Amino acid sequence: MLDVMYFAWVRERIGEPREQVETNAATVAELIEELRRREERYALAFSDLSALRVALDQELSDFDAPLDGVREVAFFPPMTGG
């Protein structure tokens, strides 16, 4: 079971800040594919991966990163400097 968290416009499109997800995904990319197939709101939120970043257990990661041993996945837009 994974804690999946959504931030900024990702949260707005999905309509929830976090949820627990039962998954057999081996990588972040596989998890995203599973989520996309759930409902249109997920497909919309994950339609452009170049506009997304992911953190695994609060460490910035890549979409091909393995999920083995991971407890928390967070999706958010790229940070902008100021």
Image: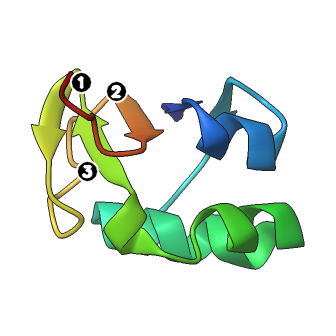
| Left or right position of 46 against 12 | left
In this rendering, the label closer to the viewer, 1 or 2? 1
Mark 1: secondary structure: loop
Q: Residue at x 27, y 34 (%)?
A: 79
* Amino acid bearing label 1: Asp
* Amino acid bearing label 3: Leu
Position above or below: 43 against 79:
below
The mark found on residue 25 in the picture is none
Place of residue 69 in the rendered image (x, y in percent of width and height, measured from the top left): 21, 36
Place of residue 74 in the rendered image (x, y in percent of width and height, measured from the top left): 41, 34
Q: Which residue is mark 1?
A: 57
Mark 2 → mark 3, Cα distance in angstroms: 8 Å
Q: Residue at x 47, y 63 (%)?
A: 31
Mark 3 → mark 1, Cα distance in angstroms: 10 Å
Mark 1 → mark 2, Cα distance in angstroms: 6 Å
The mark found on residue 67 in the picture is 3
In this rendering, the label closer to the viewer, 3 or 1? 1
Mark earlier in primary sequence (1, 2): 1
Mark 3: secondary structure: loop
Position above or below: 22 against 23:
above
